[in-house]
Amino acid sequence: MRFRQHEELDVTIVAVAPFGSKVAVDGYGDVFGFIDQVKHPSWWDEGAAPPRTGDTLHLCVLDPTREPYPRFSALRDDIGIARRLRGEA
């Protein structure tokens, strides 16, 4: 699967590390991406739960070319920016 910049996706966290979370794109089998810790809501909001394996998230694609996994963001502000850039907001 090839991602488009600013695209929105639903994902499930499959692994958590101190620097971020590996996610599987829902409905696409073994297609993965990565959320840096600062792009998860818990980094900015003490009331938000930290990422855990099995959590589901709605997010946007920040960098579809990053290797080995595309870079995603689950921050509402980034999703809003992505929508504006796509002309949907």
Image (cartoon, rainbow, N blue to C red):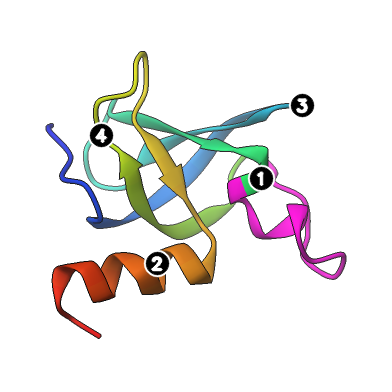
Image quarter of residue 6: bottom left
Q: Dot 4 corresponds to which residue?
A: 64
Amino acid type indicated by mark 1: Val
Q: CA distance from mark 4 to mark 2?
A: 15 Å
Q: CA distance from mark 1 to mark 4?
A: 18 Å
Amino acid type indicated by mark 4: Pro
Q: Which range is magenta?
A: 39-52
Q: Dot 1 corresponds to which residue?
A: 38
Q: Earlier in the sequence, mark 2 or mark 3?
A: 3
**Badge 2 local density, few (<14 within 10 Å), some, or many (20+)?**
many
Q: CA distance from mark 1 to mark 2?
A: 14 Å
Amino acid type indicated by mark 3: Pro
Image quarter of residue 1: top left
Query: Which of the labelled discs sits on residue 79, or is there none?
Result: 2
Q: CA distance from mark 2 to mark 3?
A: 23 Å
Image quarter of residue 53: top right
Amino acid type indicated by mark 2: Ile
Magenta stretch mostly in which secondary structure? loop
Nearer to the camera, 83 or 69 = 83
Q: On the rendered structure, is 24 left or right of 27?
A: right
Where in the figure is residue 84, as x and y percent of width and height? 26, 76
